[in-house]
Image: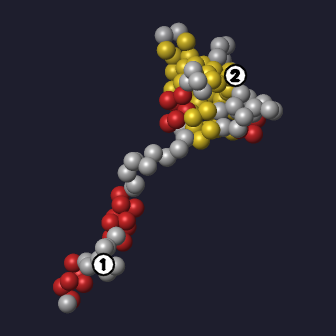
Amino acid sequence: MIATGRVSWFNLQKKIGFVKVDNGESDAFLHVSVLKAAGYVSVPAGTTLRVKIELDGNRPRVAEVLSVDTSTANPGEPGPVRRKKNPTEAPPDSAKARTRASLRLDGSTPTTTASMKSE
C-alpha cells in the first residue's frame, strides 16, 4: 500500500526509525537500507515521506521510500544526510563509451571504422 507519513524518529547509530503513517494505526518500521535506496542515510524527525508499506507479520514496515519532503521537519532537527555516491559504481553505458573514447594517451582522436575506411 502507498501511504504518506511523517518520521517519528530516526536513529542513525541504531540504523532504524519509525514513520507515523497518516491513515495507519501504528507506526511503520523504517530501516536505513530502505533510506539508502532512496538516496538518504538519515532524515530528521517530522520529515514527510511518501512510502510503500508492507506487512512484516502483523507489523507495518516501510518497503520503499518514494519521496522525501524535509520542509516539514521539526525545528531544531539536524538536516537530512544524503547518501554519497559510490566511486566504484559503474557509470551508465553512454558515459563509459564517452570516457573510453576520450582517453587516449597520445592525445589523438579515437578512430572510428568509418574514418579508417576513408583513409
Residue located at (55% from left, 33% from top)? 35
Circle 1: is it few (<14), some (14-19), or many (20+) Cα within 10 Å? few
Secondary structure beneath disc 2? strand
Q: Amino acid at mark 2?
A: Ser
Q: Amino acid at mark 1?
A: Asp
**Labels 1 and 2: the sequence-earlier one:** 2
Q: Quadrant of residue 69?
A: top right
Q: Which numbered mark, 1 or 2, is in the foreground of this view?
A: 1
Is the N terminus in the top left, top right, bottom left or bottom right quadrant? Answer: top right
Taking 67 as reference, is 57 left or right? left
Q: Quadrant of residue 15?
A: top right
Secondary structure beneath disc 1? loop
Q: Residue furthest right?
A: 75
Is 64 drawn above or below residue 85 in the view shown? above
Q: Residue furthest top?
A: 58
Of 10 and 87, nearer the camera is: 87
Residue 106 badge = 1
Is 6 drawn above or below residue 55 in the view shown? below
Residue located at (56% from left, 16% from top)? 60
Residue located at (36% from left, 72% from top)? 102
Find residue 64 and report its horizontal and vertical position in percent. 52, 31
Residue under label 2: 8
